[in-house]
Image (spheres, rainbow, N blue to C red):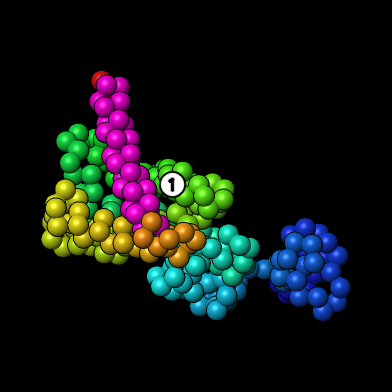
Amino acid sequence: MGSSVPSHCLNCESVMAPGQAFCSSCGQKRTDQRLTLAGIGHDLVHALFHVDHSILALLKGLLVRPGHVAREFVEGRRRKYFSPFAFAVITAGLATFFVIAMGARWFSPITDSAAQGILSRHINLVVLLQTPVLAALCALLFWNERLNFAEHLVLVAYTAGIRMLYLSLVAAPVMYATGITSANPWFIAGYYGPWLVYFAIAAVQFYRGQPWVTVLKAVVAATLNQLLAMVGIYAFILTYERMSP
């Protein structure tokens, strides 16, 4: 079956002029209807390695200048970067996969094995639910920045994504290789310590206040967020135990 370049956009049906590469209404690339493996491969390579709007470019930016990346996204330079919210969802899914695949005892202080299993299988939800809470804490502590909740959420989503990659590629493999649990003091220091440092650096780059004040507020926000997450987890356990036959 042959393919031909259509005279209209296959996404929104707008008429396209001869030689027009992209739809002027919705921006979709002009192409034929047939999906091929070559096309899929091209899209994958483009998503990974293209200079603009690629995942690798985003990762590089978030590793060295996370606050600047979030600030640029907030200020409108959004086409340049992968969506912070899609990034957070994807990395949370990866964290769930690695925790389950490697049998990491992430919720080891929990004695109820059934509750532990539920939390481990849905660690992505546990992580994602912490994101708006941390954004709310940042909005409260950095109220003088005159940013709205969604703008604080951009910083939190980007940094949470890196935290989840660290969980997936470092923390979970370490737990698998050594057999330690999340209750181990050395593990706690090796996981939460870098997170606090990273989030503080990102906050200094993102917010406009005095650096030392920003660091203090960022550490307070991240610590309170973790404590609230622990309260929420134990509230879930108590509810689960009461509702279980």
Quarter of the figure with the N terminus: bottom right
Check disc 1 and report the residue beneath it: 141
Name the spot of residue 245 as percent of width and height, x first.
25, 20
Against 87, residue 45 (above or below) is below
User: Which of 110 and 12 lies nearest the eye of the viewer?
Assistant: 110
The part of the image, by quadrant, that contains residue 234 is top left
Q: Position of residue 48 (x, y in %)?
A: 49, 73
Q: Is residue 4 visible?
A: no
Q: How many marks?
A: 1
**Quadrant of the image occupied by residue 167:** bottom left
- Name the foreground residue: 57 vs 77: 77
**Residue 234 shown in magenta:** yes
Find numbered disc 1 in the image and state the secondary structure of the residue it sits on.
helix
Q: Can you give x and y, in whole percent of width and height, for residue 187 in the image?
A: 18, 56
User: In the rendered view, does 183 fall on the left or right side of 75?
Assistant: left
Q: Which residues are the magenta region?
A: 214-243
**Residue at 38 percent of width and 51 percent of height:** 217
Front residue of 9/46: it is: 46
At label 1, which amino acid type do we have? Leu
Q: Residues within 10 Å of mark 1 (few under 14, many from 20)?
A: some
Tell me if 184 is positioned left or right of 5 in this view: left
Q: Where on the picture, by quarter, is residue 241?
A: top left
Asked whether residue 227 appears in the rendered view, the answer is: yes
Q: Residue at x 51, y 58 (%)?
A: 84
Q: Which residue is depicted at the point 62% across and 67% down?
A: 77
Residue at horizontal 71 percent and vertical 70 percent from the top: 29
Magenta span: chief secondary structure: helix
- The x, y position of residue 189, in whole percent, is 19, 57
Q: Is residue 111 magenta?
A: no
In depth, the one of 141 and 61 nearer the eye is 141
